[in-house]
Image: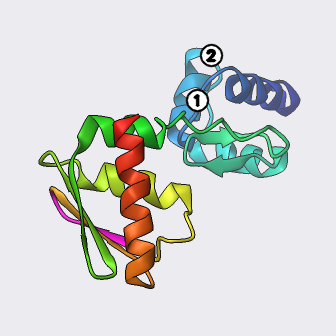
Amino acid sequence: MDHLYRRNLILELVQSGTVATQEELRRKLARRGIRVTQATVSRDIEELRLVKTREGYRLPDAPEPAAPAQPTLAIVLKEFVREVAQASNLVIVKTHPGNAHTVAVALDAEQWPEVAGTVAGDDTIFVATARARDAARLRKKLLAILAS
């Protein structure tokens, strides 16, 4: 078997769909009548300079797959938040059971200057701020989003 043909086929397979492992690539080649060992596939991948990502192998100059769209903070807050309170320099956010992590991630993603960090449990988030004044401002911000 001509190695140039095999490598072109590997490129075609990688570009046309997800190839997560070398074994998967070996099986896809076998379905097309090309029987090779894992060592051969490994050498081909190295020669082609394919890059291993979480999604599988890709060409090094191929763009990263776009991250899935995340819901906006307003949607997350309105969907999951039940209560927002302040305790000194903390803002306590109560959510429906099992949703605190989702809300905390959305809050962290906003990168608001008032937020020093978040700690999420099952249905409660502690949002740390530097000062009580920052906590009051953050609480008002969150309540305004919930009211809109």
Single out the mark in the foreground, 2 or 1.
Answer: 1
Which residue is labeled 2 in the image?
A: 33
Secondary structure type for disc 1: loop
Judge the density around disc 1: few (<14), some (14-19), many (≥20) Cα neighbours within 10 Å.
some
Is residue 134 left or right of 62 when viewed as pictured?
left
Check contact, mark 2 vs mark 1: CB within 8 A.
Answer: no
Task: Please tell me which residue is depicted at 68% across the width and 24% down the height of the picture.
Answer: 13
Is residue 114 rendered magenta in the image? no
Task: Please tell me which residue is depicted at 43% across the width and 78% down the height of the picture.
Answer: 133
Instruction: Pick whichever of labels 2 and 1 is earlier in the sequence.
Output: 1
Q: Is residue 117 visible?
A: no
Quadrant where the N terminus lies?
Answer: top right
Q: In the image, residue 61 lies at what x, y percent? A: 85, 43
Is residue 18 left or right of 71 when viewed as pictured?
right
**Mark identifier at residue 18:** 1
Q: In the image, residue 86 lies at what x, y percent? A: 26, 70
Q: Is residue 19 visible?
A: yes
Is residue 95 left or right of 57 when viewed as pictured?
left
In the displayed structure, 24 sits above or below 144; it is above
Residue 3 lies in what quarter of the image? top right
Q: Relative to the observer, which residue lies in front, 17 or 124?
A: 124
Residue 12 lies in what quarter of the image? top right
- The boundaries of the magenta stretch are 118-122
Main secondary structure of the magenta stretch: strand
Q: Relative to the observer, which residue lies in front, 62 or 36?
A: 62
In the displayed structure, 17 sits above or below 36; it is above
Task: Please tell me which residue is depicted at 59% across the width and 41% down the height of the picture.
Answer: 56
Is residue 115 left or right of 82 when viewed as pictured?
right
Label 1 is placed on what type of residue? Answer: Thr
Label 2 is placed on what type of residue? Answer: Gly
